[in-house]
Image (cartoon, helix red, strand yellow):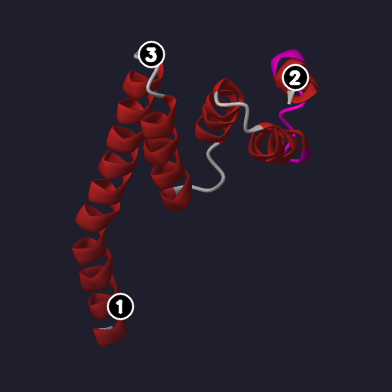
Amino acid sequence: MRNAALLIAIVILCLPRISLAQDENERNFNKGMEYYQQGLYDKAIIELEISKMAAPGNKRVRYNLGIAYLQLDKDQKAAEEFLYLVKAGEDTAGVRYYLGRA
């Protein structure tokens, strides 16, 4: 019983941190997209890479990061992002199109 209460307390204490991390990740993604729309691709990549570190499996981040890399002619980095998506099951026409451009 005591172990269960301790476990519940730990979970309750950790939940706000998880939520804060998710919020921070979303802020990084949104900031990256703002920079992208402004044509500030270097800054966009920095924010999207931070977002990717927090959630490496986030396909939306990986897709947009690949496109940002293409804008700076960083074809190898772009290809890595799109290949990740293909291997992760996101083998869509859009992914294939950008992979072909990389």
Vertical placement of residue 19 versus 32, above or below? below
- Labels 3 and 2: the sequence-earlier one: 3
Residue annotated with mark 1: 4
| Residue situated in front as seen by the camera: 52 or 91 | 52
Distance of mark 1 from mark 2, alpha carbons? 54 Å
State the residue at coordinates (56%, 35%). 62
Q: Quadrant of residue 49?
A: top left
Element at label 1: helix
Relative placement, left or right, of 16 versus 66 is: left
Relative placement, left or right, of 34 versus 81 is: left
Residue annotated with mark 3: 37
Label 1 Cα neighbours within 10 Å, binned few <14 / some 14-19 / many ≥20: few
Kind of residue at disc 1: Ala
Vertical placement of residue 13 versus 92, above or below? below
Distance of mark 3 from mark 1, alpha carbons? 49 Å
Relative placement, left or right, of 60 versus 27 is: right
The mark lying in front, picked from 1 and 2, is 2
Residue annotated with mark 2: 101
Vertical placement of residue 71 versus 8, above or below? above
The mark lying in front, picked from 3 and 1, is 3
Over which residues does the magenta segment extend?
87-94
State the residue at coordinates (44%, 25%). 41
